[in-house]
């Protein structure tokens, strides 16, 4: 059995979409059930929840699964847990989910901003803090940024060697170690 990935490689930006893009979470009680599901598995230490937004037909979140929980299992807790609680006879979720690994502090902050601004861009709220189903308003149900974000030598090396990495110029003087 392969060893699990180090925790600094296990933070993800995830998106789960409802089946046929049904606007399930437009109904307040359904959005509340999903929020309860997210917080239930968070308090059971299945994952850390760093940011989220529940949109009418999808969920965005930044999660770090616990060391013994795979990303796929964490998403199964969320999607399956919600479906069980909803008790719908129709399909609830699209079969898969989208994920993007977060290796740097910059990407973490960009994903968090994207999540928080999503209801504003969609015209659902004038500011992130005014949207009832997002982490910008529900600060008591989220975990802080992982302390290792931006500090992993692997993450720094991977970002520097990525063909998609933006080049950054610095004007700080080079200091010798003598």
Image (cartoon, rainbow, N blue to C red):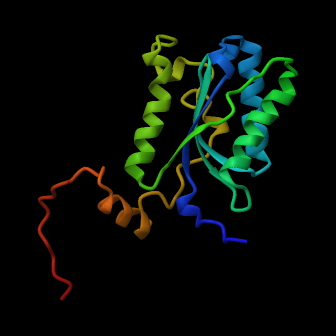
Residue furthest bottom as drawn: 178
The structure residue drawn at horizontal position 45% and vertical position 13%, both measured from the top left corner, is 126
92 versus 114 height, above or below: above
Q: Residue at x 56, y 48 (%)?
A: 144
Q: What residue is drawn where x is 69% and y is 33%?
A: 95
Residue at point 85%, 18% (across, down): 88
Corner quadrant of residue 136? top right
- Count the marks: how many? 0
> Residue 79 location in percent, x, y?
74, 34
Q: Nearer the viewer, residue 165 or 47?
A: 165
The image quadrant that residue 168 belongs to is bottom left
Task: Please state, as top left, top right, bottom left or bottom right, where the C terminus lies in the image.
Answer: bottom left
Q: Residue 150: give x, y in percent of width and height.
A: 41, 59
Vertical arrangement, residue 135 with respect to residue 63, above or below: above
Query: In the image, 83: left or right of 63?
Result: right
Residue 110, located in which quarter of the rendered image? top left
**Residue 19 x, y percent position in the rendering:** 68, 21
Judging depth in this view, the residue of 49 and 80 nearest the camera is: 80
Which image quadrant: the N terminus?
bottom right
Relative vertical location of residue 40 with respect to residue 1 in this rendering, above or below: above
Residue 57: x %, y % from top left: 62, 19
Foreground residue among 177 and 25? 25
């Amino acid at each position: 059995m392969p060893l699990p990935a180090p925790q600094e490689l296990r933070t993800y930006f995830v998106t789960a979409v409802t089946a046929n893009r049904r606007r399930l979470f437009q109904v307040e009680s359904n959005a509340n059930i999903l929020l309860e599901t997210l917080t239930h598995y968070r308090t059971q230490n299945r994952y850390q929840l760093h940011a989220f937004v529940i949109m009418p037909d999808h969920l965005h979140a930044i999660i770090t699964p616990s060391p013994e929980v795979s990303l796929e299992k964490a998403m199964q807790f969320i999607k399956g847990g919600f479906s069980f609680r909803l008790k719908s006879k129709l399909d609830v979720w699209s079969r898969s989910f989208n994920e993007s690994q977060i290796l740097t502090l910059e990407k973490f902050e960009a994903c968090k901003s994207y999540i928080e601004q999503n209801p504003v861009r969609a015209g659902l709220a004038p500011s992130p803090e005014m949207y009832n189903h997002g982490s910008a308003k529900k600060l008591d149900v989220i975990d802080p940024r992982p302390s290792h974000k931006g500090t992993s030598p692997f993450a720094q090396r991977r970002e520097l060697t990525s063909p998609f990495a933006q080049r950054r110029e610095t004007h700080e003087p080079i200091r010798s170690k003598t």
